[in-house]
Image (cartoon, rainbow, N blue to C red):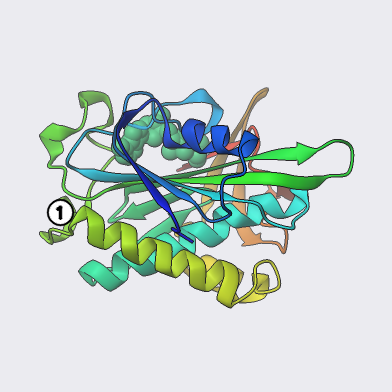
Amino acid sequence: IGHPVIFLDEVDSTNNYAKTLGASNAQNGTAVVAARQTAGKGRLARKFESPEGCGVYLSIFLRPKLQVSDINCITLMTAVVVADTVEELCGLRPTIKWTNDVYLNGKKLCGILTECSIEGESGAVEYAVVGIGTNLGQTSVDFPEEIRNIATSVFQETGVRIAQADYAAALLKNFERYFYEQHFPENKASFLGQYRKDLFFLGQEVTVVGMTGQYTAVAMDIDEEGRLLVRTEDGRTKALNSGEISIRMK
Ligand code: ATP
C-alpha cells in the first residue's frame, strides 16, 4: 500500500482522481494525496472541507479479490486504522460513529468514503477506492462557520501537531497491516471487535434518519456484515445498511 504515492497540489476529490486509475493499469495499492481538495466528498453528495496545510486528504486505489458485499466492511476496517493511527501519533484514541466517521472528544475528526466498480452481474469488485480525510492542524476559525461546532482537529483537541507526511505514512502502514498482513476480509472478527469497542453509541437511544422519515431506536450491535443492529420502540431488531441512512445522537 502506498507504492507509489501520487502527490497533487490540488484536485476536486482524491477519490475521483483515484477512480480514473481504474481505467489504466495502475498498481494495486497506489495512494493519491492532495494538498487541498476543491470538492472533497462525504456520503450522499455531501462536502468534506479540505483546506490546504491543515489536513491529509488521501485515497487508496485497490484491485482486491472481493465481492461487493465486502465493501462495507472496508470502511469499518479503515475507521479502526484511522483510530490506531491517531492514537499512535497523539496519544488519544478517537471514537467511531457508525459507519464512516471518526470522532475526537465528540466532534468529527475524519471522514471515510469507499467507492467501488463492480464487474458486470458477478458482484466481483473490479476496483475499490478508499478515501480518508483527516483534520490535523485546524483551529476552530479554520472551519467554515456551519461546521465549527461539529468538526475538530487533532491539534484543537490535544495540542499535538502531527506532520502531514508522518500521518500519511503511518496511515498507509496501518492500512497495509490490517488489509494485507492480517488478510482482509478473513480478519473481520478481529477488527469488528475493535470497531465495537470504539463505537460511542452502543446501548444508547439514537434517531435513525432515512429517506422517508425518522424513528427512535436503541443501537445494539454491529453484525458480521458491518450493519448496525437497532431495537425499535416496538421491540423488533432491525439490521441497517449504511446506504441511505444517518444516525443522530439524542
Ligand atoms: P453520516 O455519515 O452519519 O450521515 P455526516 O453528517 O458526518 O454523518 P458525511 O457524509 O459522512 O456525513 O460527511 C459529510 C459531512 O461532514 C458534511 O455534511 C459536514 O457536516 C461534515 N464536514 C465537512 N467537512 C468536514 C471536515 N473537514 N471535518 C469534519 N466534518 C466535516
User: What residue do we see at 34% from left, 66% from top?
Assistant: 170
Q: Quadrant of ligand 1?
A: top left
Question: What residue appears at the point 57 percent right and 45 percent down from the top-left corner?
Answer: 26
Q: Is residue 194 left or right of residue 67?
A: left
Q: Position of residue 7 (x, y in %)?
A: 33, 43
Q: Which residue, as the protein is rendered here, is positioned at the far right?
A: 121
Image quarter where the C terminus lies is: top left
Q: Residue at x 58, y 54 (%)?
A: 28
Q: Nearer the viewer, residue 85 or 126?
A: 126
Of residues 204 and 246, which is closer to you in this image? 246
Looking at the picture, how far across and down is residue 206, in whole percent?
53, 46
Residue 128, given in percent of the width and then of the height, sits at 62, 46
- Report which residue position mark 1 lands on: 155
Disc 1 marks a residue whose amino acid type is Phe
Residue 57, position as x, y percentages in the image: 35, 43
Q: Residue at x 55, y 61 (%)?
A: 77
Please name whichever residue, 12 or 236, is drawn nearer the observer in this view of the structure: 12
Q: In the figure, 20 relative to 57: above or below?
A: above
Q: Is residue 92 found left or right of 61 in the rendered image?
A: left
Residue at the limit of the structure toward the front, as seen here: 25
Q: Quadrant of residue 39?
A: top left
Mark 1: which secondary structure?
helix
Q: Is residue 69 visible?
A: yes
Task: Using a 10 Å C-alpha cutoff, classify the residue at mark 1 as few (fewer than 14 neighbours), some (14 to 19) or many (20 or more).
Answer: some
Query: Is residue 142 depicted above or below 81 in this figure?
Result: above
